[in-house]
Amino acid sequence: MDAWRLSSPYAGIGIYVGGSNRLCDQPELDADWVGTQQRRGWHLLPLWVGPQASCSGYPDVMSSDVAGAGREGRREAAAAVSTARGLGIGRGSTLYYDLEDYDIAPDDCRRAALSFLSGWTKALRGSGYRSGVYSNIAAAITSLDYANRVSRGSYAMPDDIWFAWDNGRSDVRTDKRVLSDEWDDHDRVHQYALDVTQAFGGYPMVVDANWVDVGRGSVAPRSRPLCRGVDVDLRRYPTLGKGRSGDAVRAAQCLLRRQGVLKAPLTGRYDARTAAAVGKAQRRLDLPETGRLTRSTWTALLARGGQPLLKVGDTGTGVLRLQRALTAALGRPVRIDGVVDKGTARAVAAYQRKVGLPATGVVTPEVWDSLT
C-alpha cells in the first residue's frame, strides 16, 4: 500500500468489507488497517457484496418477491452499517452495494432487485450513511435510471452510482443507458478498465481501474494573493534583468519578499536592490549567482515551500505552487487553479521526462527537489 501510495497515480481503493458473496477472506481488514490507510492519504470506498439478483445464478440470491427483497435490502444495510462502524467507517460515509451482472428483462427479477436496493438505501440513510450501488452499467445502473425516469418516487434512489463499463475512458460520462439527471452532481464512479496488471514501487497487482467523481469534487482553494495587489499567476515567467519593468518584475519582487531577501517596496522596476535580492536568493537555492531572473530561478522561487505528495484530484496551495513552477520550468502555460487535473498531471509527466525522472504524473519529493 505504501509503495503504491507513493508511486502510482491512484488515490483511492475499493475494499470489500463483507457480504455473503464476498469471494475471499480479508484477515488484515480491521479498524487499525483502515485508520492507517486513511492517515497515509488513501480514500476508501467500502463495498458490500451480499445476495445477488434472483435470476443471476449466484450461490446466495435475494427473494424474487418484491416485498421480501425490500426487507432483505434493509437487513443487508444493517449488517453493512454494523461492520462499517467496527472498522471505523463512520456516519456520512457512502457504503456501496455490489450487485453483479444480471438480466434485467424478467419483470420479477428486475423489480425485486429495485426493491432490494431501495430498502438498502432507505436503511442506510436512516442510520446516517449514504447509499451507493455498484453494478454493470447495463444491469442495475440501467434499471435504476429507467425506474427513476418512468416511475419517479416508486423506489429510493442511491446517492451515488458506481458503474462498470470497460471502455478505457477515465471519466464519468455515460451513454443512453443513463439519461436521468439523478447522479449529475459529483455522484458517480466509473470502472473503466478491468483486470489490468500494473506495477508501482516494485509491486505488481491485477486491478480494476476507476475514475471517481463524488462528494464535492475537487474544489479549488480560495485565492489569497501572496502580496497585496500583485498577481503571481502568470502565463509565462520571462528572463529578467536590470532595466526591465512591469507585472512580471512585481511578481518576482513579491516572491523575493516572501523568501525574506527583499525588503524594498514592490515597485515593478528591476533595479539594483532587486538584482541584489535575486543574487542572494540564488545563493540560497544553490543556483549560479547572476542577479538575473532565469528560468531555473523562477522555477525554484515559485516551487519553494512544503513538499506534499500530489496526484490527480488533489487541491490546495501546494498545487498552486506546483502549477506556477511547471509553467516556468516548461516554458509554457499550465493552468493555475489549485486543482491537479489531467492537464496538470500531463505537465508533471512532461517535466519528469525533461529531468530524467519516471514519467508517472505523480508529484513526489523527488519532483519537488528537482523544481527547487
Image (cartoon, grey):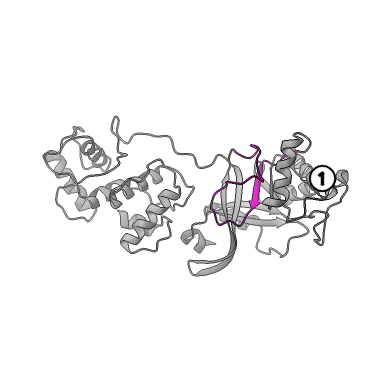
Determine which residue is flagged by label 1.
111
Q: Nearer the viewer, residue 271 or 187?
A: 187
Q: Residues within 10 Å of mark 1 (few under 14, many from 20)?
A: many
Q: Is residue 67 left or right of residue 132?
A: right
The question of residue 165 being in magenta is answered with yes
Q: Is residue 82 left or right of residue 185?
A: right
Quadrant location of residue 266? top left
Q: Quadrant of the N terminus?
A: bottom right
Q: Is residue 303 visible?
A: no
Residue sitting at x 62%, y 46%: 175
Q: Is residue 354 left or right of residue 69?
A: left
Magenta extent? 156-184
**In x, y percent, where is residue 163?**
65, 51
Q: Is residue 1 left or right of residue 357?
A: right
- Between 91 and 76, the residue placed more toward the observer is 76
Against 24, residue 190 (above or below) is above
Question: In the figure, residue 147 lies in which quadrant?
Answer: top right
**Residue at 35% across, 54% down:** 368
Q: Is residue 232 magenta?
A: no
Given residues 80 and 48, the one toward you in this image is: 48
Residue 220 location (% of width, % of height): 45, 39
As helix, strand or loop, the secondary structure at mark 1 comes to: helix
**Residue 77 appearing in the image:** yes
Amino acid type at image mark 1: Arg
Please provide percent x and percent y for residue 156. Answer: 75, 38
In front of the other: 153 or 229: 153
Q: Is residue 90 placed above or below 201 in the rendered structure? A: above
**Which residue is drawn at the image coordinates 60% and 39% (left, top)?**
184
